[in-house]
Amino acid sequence: MRTLSTVDGPRAAPFYQGRAGRTITDDNARELWKKNDDIGGRKGRYVFGMRAGGGFTRAYVGKATKSFKQEVFTHHKLTRYQSSLADFLKGTPVVFFVLTPKKKGAVNASHVGELEDFLVQAGLVANPEPLDIQGTKTEEWGIAGVLRGGRGKPSKGAGQFRPLMKL
C-alpha cells in the first residue's frame, strides 16, 4: 500500500524586524508553535522558504523524525534560515510542512528518507543555490523544458509532457 504524505502550509514564520535586517528569535519560534500547535507534535519534512512577488523561493529542506517542534528551529537550522533572511530584502518567511501519515509505532524511516531526497532534488530545480548541504549534488541529466532543462521557452511537446507525467 502507498504511503501518502500531506502538505500543510504555507504557514508564516514570525520574525524580528530590526533596523539593519531580520532574524528569527527564540520568541518567534515559540510564537509559531503557539499559533500552530496542531502540527508541532507531528513528524515529516519541512521546507523553509520566502514568499515574495506572488511566488515562493525554497531555502532549506529539513526532516523531523522526533517532532517539528523539537527540530525545526534548532540552532543549526536557524543559522541556515538567517542566511536566507539576509539574502531577501523583501518577502515573508514561510514554512511548508510535509506530514507523514499518523500511525501507531515508529515513523517509516525509509519513506521519510526518500521524501527528503525527492524534495531536495526537486527544490534544486527551483533554487540551484539552496542552504541545504545533504543531497544537493545536482544530477547531470535533464529533459529540456521538463526537468533540469535550463532556461527558455519549453517546446510544445515538453509543455504537454509535464502534466502527463505530473511534473
Image (spheres, helix red, strand yellow):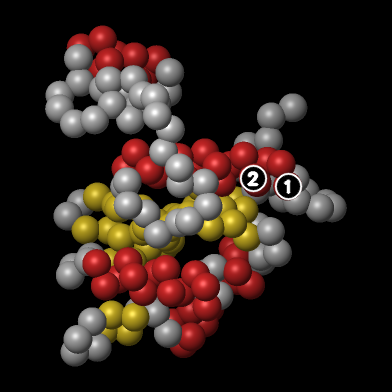
Residue topped by disc 2: 113
The Cα atoms of the two marked residues, 1 and 2, are separated by 6 Å
Image x and y of residue 69, in percent: 60, 71
Quarter containing the C terminus: top left
Question: x%, y% of residue 73?
Answer: 52, 73
Q: Are marks 1 and 2 in contact (CB under 8 Å)?
A: yes
Q: Secondary structure at mark 1?
A: helix
Which quarter of the figure is the N terminus placed in?
top right
- Residue 150 versus residue 155 in the image, above or below: below
Q: Amino acid at mark 1?
A: Ala
Picture residue at 20% right of the left edge, 51% below the top: 54
Residue 81 figure quarter = bottom left
Residue at 73% x, 47% y is 109
Q: Is residue 40 left or right of residue 119?
A: right
Residue situated furthest top in the rendering = 157
Q: On residue 109, which mark appears? A: 1
Please state which amino acid type lies under the numbered disc 2.
Gly
Residue 99 drawn at (x, y percent): 60, 51
At x 43%, y 74%, the residue is: 79
Q: Which mark is residue 165?
A: none
Snapshot quadrant of residue 125: top left
